[in-house]
Image: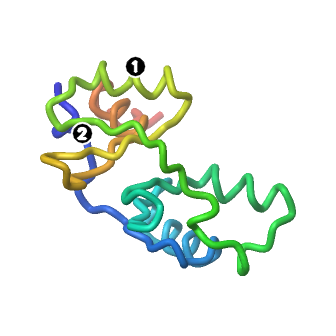
Amino acid sequence: MLVRDAMSTVILTLGPAHTLRQAATLMSARRVGAAVVLDPDAGGIGILTERDILNSVGLGQNPDAERTHAHTTTDVVFAAPTWTLEEAARAMAHGGFRHLIVLDRGEVAGIVSVRDIVRRWLPAREPTPAL
């Protein structure tokens, strides 16, 4: 199975000036754990994850004052839609992260998460039998 079969194609995109509270609000509303940050001044495409926001709050930083650009990972490992799920899982395990931005011909095509991969690898849950 390939990354394109598991990735989410509906992507939350933020700018570098969004506050962490705005990012958290949007991520929560969309029920996603990561957002793509487009910042042409910092190299283009980055990723902001729930862990980045949690780390900032844990350090006592103000989520209304902190901007996404200060917490965005810019040395991103990108996946291709033609990668196998095993390749994506290996990259995540090796890098210690749970999300990969998927690029197709240099354009953001989606995001694949550990949860997306697990859902594809495991059979659908069967209803619990009634007692």
Where residue 59 appears, x then y in whole percent? 84, 57
Three-letter amino acid code of the residue under disc 2: Ala
Whether residue 103 can be seen here: yes
Marks 2 and 1, how far apart in space? 15 Å
Whether residue 125 can be seen here: no
Report the residue at 14% width, 31% height from top.
82
Nearer to the camera, 42 or 113: 42
User: Mark 1 falls on what kind of element?
Assistant: helix
Q: Looking at the rendering, in which quadrant would you find the N terminus? A: top left
Report the residue at 32% width, 48% height from top.
111
Where residue 66 appears, x then y in whole percent? 70, 72
Other-residue count near label 1 (Cα within 10 Å), few / some / many at <14 / 14–19 / ≥20:
few
Vertical placement of residue 80 versus 58, above or below: above
Where residue 36 appears, x then y in whole percent? 40, 59
Task: Please tell me whether mark 2 or mark 1 is closer to you in this view.
Answer: 1
- Tell me whether the residue at label 2 lies in contact with that at label 1, contact meaning CB atoms closer than 8 angstroms: no
Three-letter amino acid code of the residue under disc 1: Arg
Where residue 90 appears, x then y in whole percent? 40, 19
| Residue on which the image places disc 1 | 90
User: Mark 2 falls on what kind of element?
Assistant: helix
| Residue on which the image places disc 2 | 6
